[in-house]
Amino acid sequence: MSARSSLSLLLVILYVVAFAQCQSDAPLKNSKRTLVVLDTFDYKVSHSKFFQQLTKKGHKLTYKLAFDQDIVLSKYDDYHFDNLIIISSSKRSSFGGELKYASALSKFVDNNAGNVFVVAGSSGLSKPLREFATENGVGFDDEGTSVIDHFNYDVNLDTSFRHTVVACNQVSQLPSSRVIRDAQKFVTKPILYSGLAISLDRHRNKLLLPILTGSSTSYSFDADQSGTNAEPSIRGRNTVLVGALQARNGARITFVGGSEVLSDKYFSSQVQSTQSSSGNEDFSNELISWSFQDRCVIRHSNVSHHLVVPSAVDAPGYYKVGELMDYSVIFEEWDGDSRKWVPFVTDDVQLELIMLHPYVRTDLKHVADGKYAARVKVPDTYGVFKLHVDYRRDGLSHLIFDDQITIRPTRIEEFERFVPAASPYYTIMFSTMATFFVFSTLFLYTREKPKTD
Amino acid sequence: MANENIFEIIAKLVENYKKDTPQKVKLIDLFIVFTGLTAAIQFVYRVLVGTFPLNAFLAAFFTCLSLLVFTVALRKQVNPATSGEFRVVPERAFGDYIFCCVLTFFVAMSYIG
């Protein structure tokens, strides 16, 4: 009996220790097991620098052919991989192994919060990937089309003279400044791109964000059908070349319209217009560090709220209406290079006190080391309130958290007893009583004067 | 009669009141005016300053009003012109009056603070 109880105690301790370990375990995804699914192993050669970048960032790459029947993503709901890279343009309708069903990718995102990096191959995008993209509100243009820009094309690589190798050198073409930092450097080092155009339905899906877009003169069209009058379906700034979806569980799905943008050839190409090497290597470096959650992943900790008095208890059960409260929380960002959580500093965090609708909405000011604080006067309405922080920004992982507080009304003995504002009433009360006394006395002792006339 | 103006009518009224009204009733009338004015002052103060604290206002204001009502009742029972309706001796009427007022004061004092 005692042996059994001590065993169960040991189990409990083990469990607690394991749980504590889990809590302090720094990133959401500490390991970087990455499955690379390719049409042919030729990509390993043509994209060797891209794969080197991944290895340098600590990814353990496992290569598989797309139609390999032994692709296994998970066993007993335990996933073998944290990230998935697929480069495919195959015309076959389904992949092999566990990827046979298009839903496998969605499940990988939903159940595993795994990052998916989809790249269209040199001759288009394969059908299962197209389905997966459509599920996520990402529309690739039809097979055979490509992005064309007659004003910003690269002379060296554009061997077909159809202006399908686009040079991106405008800051406005990199709209997500958190994903691709320092867009300015691509002005002198353009990003070369050729491939399909993507359209993002951002009105319906707020989780989508464009990473690299075409310039205002770009459009998507079948370059062989130059004579037709049909209008291109994707054009101008809406032409997205690289886009992403950040799922609510933090997983990031990146869509790249053409595999060339990540190829060695484009990495090392010289751009004639700016007389410099291309910016593709830097772009790819930024893109994969974001896509595989090396940065822009934030978390919160140490939520604390208490009364504004010296010896206040943390997180008291009740606040009285109108009391002053101090709220603070720590925001941290994962830094993939140093593999540490570092303070996250920004100026647009807000705190809300919500009971069905927000009663108070106030700025959380950064104090020091990622600590944000606000002094709030709790509302004059009693009830159960949420201390709600909702921080969702493009490119950052979402941070939404609540704490519950109860605001109670003033108790009967807590009201002020004698208020200066009421002094006229007190005076009148006593003067009335005094006058009443005088009146009664006079009334009793008054005699009617006898009528004289 | 027709060419008498309003001031003359009022002057006559006051004169008649002075002459015909018993001394006790005059005293009662004075007290009625006092309570009425006090109530009016409080109401003006409440409008200017606000309802807080409401309990103090209610206590003092309604004390004045109820005193006014009680005193009017006393006047009817004491004034020879109207006392015929009541079969109550003036001493009994005054006793009732005192009782009601003191009771009101108790209630109001416990409510005011």
Image: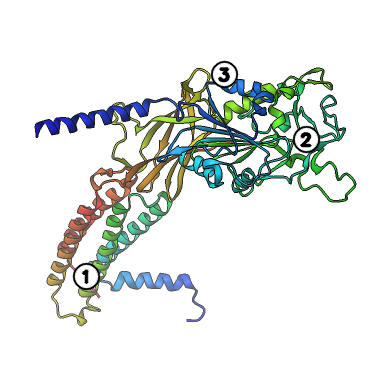
**Please, what is the three-letter code of the amino acid marked with disc 2?**
Ser
The residue lying furthest to the front in this view is A69
In front: label 2 or label 1: 2
Q: Are marks 1 and 3 on the same chain?
A: no
Q: Would you place residue A218 above or below residue A45 in this image? A: below
Q: In front here: A245 or A134? A: A134
Comparing A13 with A236, the one in front is: A13
Which residue does the image show at 49% across and 32% down from the upper left?
Answer: A82
Q: Farthest right residue? A: A227
Q: Position of residue A38 (x, y in %)?
A: 62, 33
Q: Which residue carries the number 3 mark?
A: A56
State the quadrant of the N terminus of chain A: top left
Q: Residue at x 36, y 29 (%)?
A: A22
Task: Identify residue for label 2.
Answer: A215
Q: In the displayed structure, does residue B82 sit left or right of residue B2?
A: left
In three-dimensional space, the C-alpha distance between marks 1 and 3, rounded to whole angstroms, equals 104 Å
> Who's the residue at 21% across and 58% down the image?
A436
User: Does residue A419 appear anywhere in the picture?
Assistant: yes
Hey, which quadrant is residue B99 in on the image?
bottom left
In the rendered structure, find residue B74 and report the number of the disc placed on it.
1
For mark 1, name the chain. Answer: B
Disc 3 element = helix
**Res. A400 visible in picture:** no
Left or right, residue A212 beside residue B70: right
- The type of residue carrying mark 1 is Leu
- Marks 3 and 2, the one that precedes in the sequence: 3
Residue A231: % across, % down: 83, 49
